[in-house]
Amino acid sequence: MAEKTALLPILNRAPAADFQGTLRQHGLGELRRREVTTLQINVGKLCNQACHHCHVEAGPKRTEIMPAKVAERLMTLLAATPSIHTVDITGGAPELNANFRTLVSESRRMGKHVIDRCNLTVLFEPGQEMLAEFLAENQVEITASLPCYTESNVDQQRGKGAFEKSIRALGVLNAIGYGRGTGLTLNLVYNPLGASLPPPQQKLEDDYKTQLRENFAIEFDRLFTITNMPIKRFAEFLVREGKHEAYMALLTNHFNPATVDGLMCRDLVSIGWDGRIYDCDFNQMLDLETPSGKTIWEIESFAELEEKSIATDGHCFGCTAGAGSSCGGSLQ
């Protein structure tokens, strides 16, 4: 904690990249929302892991956990917003939240597509013995973090033994039909180990499929590449390594105006564990609320957010650099 506190003045002095100014330079106006089609729910920061790159700063000792009254209110608002077709549940390890299964089952009852942002190793936590079966019964799409197909790289980011448990979890999911063309979708997520942009998504997906199939008999549907955001733990890593300024320059110099139309903040609304509304999960972790400053207790439908301004800052270059980045992988 002392080391983190010592880093804060350095981070606060770091030059802020002018995202809005860059949009104007390319003839692009202020970012505004379209119709909300995805409800992303961050149920809190409790997690059975404490990954080095985690923008949520999640871990086993975190106490920020979504209570039942917030989960219930979200389901009321979901029912009042017919434009939403996807409910994307994240954390932390979302499955550790006591309201997770209710959120899944209620969303499915309303006919919504549900995504679970899973770290894989949570399948072996006490009380999660039937988690895989629950997800399959509700036809939940699993988007699972696996930052590499080699043990050394994964364990470096996520802790010793994480790779072995992740491969074992993928085997469990394959055994019940995930990733095998049965309609149960299993996606993997890659993020770079250090201060670099992800490689081309399709080429890396092909490599992942070859390596996981040949070495572990593992199958999956798609690979999503996600750029490391220069916030929270990764920003602290950059400062310690003396790479913060260079990484921001990398992102800004690779700004791609063609990614702007597909940014997830245009169609997605992100809800914090306490019911506050954000334009994306990254803004949520920076306490950068929507410009209108709403909470779920101040609206009657997410449709009220349509055409509203989107809060931006220098980290937004992470989503617009190169091929672009979103919770659904590269944008181009």
Image (cartoon, helix red, strand yellow):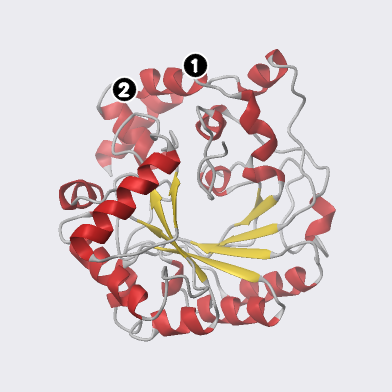
Q: What is the secondary structure assignment of the residue under circle 2? A: loop
* Picture quarter with the N terminus: top left
Picture mark count: 2
Instruction: Give the residue displayed 51% in from the left and 20% down from the top.
Output: 252
Residue 303, quarter of the rendered image = bottom right
- Tell me: 302 left or right of 112: right
**Rendered residue at 50%/46% (across/down):** 329
Label 1 – label 2 distance at C-alpha = 15 Å
Q: Amino acid at mark 2?
A: Lys
Query: Which residue corresponds to the image point at 77% horizontal and 37% vertical from the top-left?
Result: 32
Say if residue 14 shows up in the picture: no
Disc 1 and disc 2 in contact, CB within 8 angstroms: no
Instruction: Give the amino acid type for the residue marked by disc 1 in the picture.
Output: Asn
Pointer 1 or 2: first along the chain? 2
Task: Give the residue drawn at x 84%, y 54%.
Answer: 304
| Residue annotated with mark 2 | 243
Location of the C terminus (image quadrant): top right
Kindly state the secondary structure of the residue where label 1 is placed: helix
User: Badge 1, how many Cα within 10 Å: few under 14, some, many 20+?
Assistant: few
Please state the horizontal and vertical placement of residue 76, each as a whole percent of the image.
75, 74
| In front of the other: 47 or 110 | 110
Q: Which residue is mark 1?
A: 253
The spot of residue 55 in percent (x, y) is 42, 46
Image coords of residue 61 (percent x, y): 32, 63
Check the image and name the residue furthest to the top.
Answer: 25
Q: Looking at the picture, does residue 116 appear above or below residue 270?
A: below
Q: Nearer the viewer, residue 222 or 165?
A: 222
* Residue 243 sits in quarter: top left
| Residue 297 visible to the viewer | yes
